[in-house]
Image (cartoon, rainbow, N blue to C red):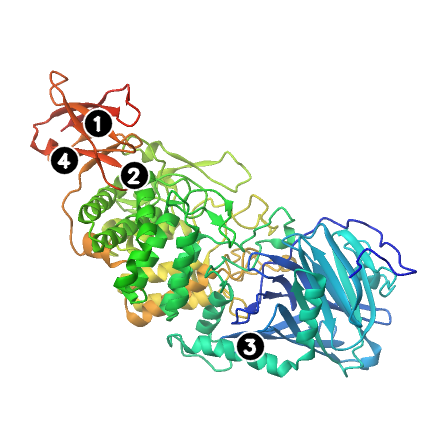
Amino acid sequence: MAVAILPPGSVVPPGAPGIEPRWTSSDKSAVGTAVSAASCVWFTVSHGILNEIYAPRLDMACVRDFGFIVTAEDYFSEEKRDAEHRVEAIEDGVPAFRLVNTAGDGRYRITKTIFSDPEREVVLQDIRFQALKGNLSDYRLHALVAPHLVNGGANNTGWYTDFKGRPMLFAEGSGRSLAVASSVPWLARSVGYVGFSDGWQTLSRGEGLRQDYCCAADGNVALSGTLDIQAGMGRALIVIGFGTQPEEAALRSLLSLEQDVEPALKHYRNGWREWQAGLLALDEPHDPTQLNRYRVSTSVLATHRDDASGAIIASLSIPWGFNKSDDDLGGYHLVWTRDLVETAGGLLAAGAAADARSVLDYLTVIQEADGHWVQNAWLDGRPYWYGIQMDETAFPILLYDMLLRSGEIGTSEAHRYLPMIEAAAGYIVKNGPATQEDRWEEDAGYSPFTLAVEIAGLLAAADAVEAAGRLDAAHYLREVADGWNERIEEWTYATDTELSRSLGIEGYYVRIASATNGAMSLRRDFIPIRNRDDLGEVLEADLLISPDALALVRFGLRAADDPRILGTIAAIDAQLRRELPAGPYWYRYNDDGYGERIGGAPFAGSGVGRLWPLLTGERAHYELAAGRADEARRMLAALEASASEGGLLPEQIWDSEDVPERELFLGRPSGSAMPLVWAHAEHIKLLRSLRDGVIFDMPPQTFARYVAAKPASAPFAWRLTGRRDQMPASRRLRIELPAPALVRWSADGWASATDSPCRDTGFGMHVFDLPTQALNPGRIDFTIFWTDVNRWEGEDYRIEVV
């Protein structure tokens, strides 16, 4: 296909390379794909039109938007800006959608049925155009397509030509191509540079489409075509196909175009019906004419899943995408291990156990050599951000344990996952319990949420290695977990603060506290507050509150009625809770900066944190654990009320006065990600938990060990990264070192000394236990000789036994 050869009379469109590319609204009203390995294409809908389309992978956005412009004599109207939009799924649990766009001035209506071809990488739009005023012949309908191949709007090339005698629109960039075809003739076609010579510009100026603009190379381009809607009596089928080569995209488009719409839609429906039929019936009672929100959530989870790998991305959106350039390559169409495991838990709660297991298989393959998982990654495992979040290393162990307990993994095949579990547990033991980043990817230190997941992960790993016959290794992992569990309050529980005194409580768990060698350091900690205009802003750790602490109950480490938890609930609600007409919602933490700026301007590195519906779901789980099922159901209703018209759950909702010009309304989705897949997984887990009367994903090991019973005291652990200078006389002292070593120690001020080799735990740590429980109060002096490098540490250490 000779892209570079322009036909006679053609001219180069002015304005190269176009304005700086931007993505589009993350406020999705629908997302969909076919349940078919042959159809590697995913579509999103917003403001009544197709926008981001992904192909051939979930992490490859290829289109910014694909909408229509309506013109008549002295008339110009763009459906996404000038029409009122309604979207509805054509069937419960089937993400094919009917979009109805009615012009605000009442002159026309465009009705579309949108779905993807189950047999190939093509998205179909079955369109009906109605003239509500005047006649059909009074109007012209123009398609406008903005290619962004791949994950970028710059350096794209667009053109129009014929393929096998069929007029089409084309674009290519970054090794991918797209083609647009129509069931009705094109009256005109054009290609231009966005903001200067694209179809929107020429149509809005009353010039029509410039057919002499045949090709726009290497820029931010747009494709346009005028449809002969009279030829189809107001009906047209428009398809957009993708491929490696333009010819491949064209062929796929025409194959989809040549088949009748109804058989393709029937095939699409049947695939989803079959998948939904295999799920548990967690459907809530609802008006048949209204949304089945459970089936919306299940279809959202499945739509964000890559069949080839089992991976699930965080969202088919780019938060505040309309304000984001090509610099934001990943958006939320990346894999976060935490979101992925939370989503797999939602699938398992719904009964899609095989899909949940494929997530575990995927995680096993992309685990890093040292046992951890990167902060987030492309589908193929290439890191995007490299931060270390310790909960993301523990979560896959918990997923394994859930699948084992559900029967999806048989005991005879559990050995397949043992290397992954041992490597992850080793990384946690060696590098925990403090984390480089908390679950919000911002601060380092001791986080109650991260601690809960790490400890639960270690206990689950202990069960796995014990089942493999490694009893000593299992015992060691449980001792590490017990030791960390004992210190949660020391690290993260603040008492006698101004806030606790004002609330009349003893204390509360904080959001995060710095990892220091000394104990009881909360009052000396200052935590950086990210995403604020004042980049140097800090807050004392004992005044920084977050609902994250409820993970101590969710993961079974503390009872729901523990006085420390009750005090924390009081602090969370005093600082972070907002009652809206639909119910209660919470902020991530006080002084959060991740959200729209004051007045509603989009987040661009700084802003003001908004309310997170996800946290309402998490709080509902706490209320269920506390025995208040009715309150949990009220919060379920609040979670669902935050959704869009189409039932999609947002990352955040707006918490201030309405700003209509920015489409921000109190209690409605803000400009951050929508849908947030993690929120939909929480919704499904909450439905399952309410049905069962217990928290679905609470690990049984932690609850049995720390709430229902109390384990023996763990060894008193000392590390180079966690030095302690006092210990009780009744405890055994454990020196934990990251390499083979010999410990020279003395209990009499170095009058005599003993050399004791460390034993290898098998998890990257080498330990020596001093029998200090048999010693009278006094002191222990010791130093370290590294046997693998034949070197003394060169420093003496002392611990007072009191």
Query: Which of the labelled discs sits on residue 167, or is there none?
Result: none
Q: Which residue was labeled with disc 3? A: 268
Quote the CA–CA distance across marks 4 and 2. Answer: 21 Å
Q: Position of residue 617 (x, y in %)?
A: 39, 61
Give the amino acid at mark 2: Gly
Task: Please state, as top left, top right, bottom left or bottom right, where the N terminus lies in the image.
Answer: bottom right
Residue 742 bears which disc, if any?
Answer: 1
Rendered-image quadrant of the C terminus = top left
Mark before the other along the chain sequence, 4 or 3: 3
> Horizontally, is 544 left or right of 664 in the view?
left
- Which secondary structure lies at badge 1? strand
Q: For the residues marked 4 and 3, what is the alpha-carbon distance in whole angstroms? A: 64 Å
Q: CA distance from mark 3 to mark 2?
A: 50 Å
Q: Residue at x 44, y 47 (%)?
A: 440
Residue type of the residue flagged with mark 3: Tyr
Image coordinates of residue 463 in percent, x first then y, are 23, 54
Between discs 4 and 2, the one toward the N terminus: 4
Let me know if residue 615 appears in the view.
Answer: no
Q: Whole-Å distance between the Cαs marked 1 and 2?
A: 15 Å
Which mark, residue 732?
Answer: 4
Q: Tell me the distance, in whole angstroms, between the alpha carbons under discs 3 and 1.
A: 66 Å
Tag in front: 3 or 1: 1
Distance of mark 1 from mark 4, alpha carbons? 18 Å
Q: Is residue 34 above or below residue 420?
A: below
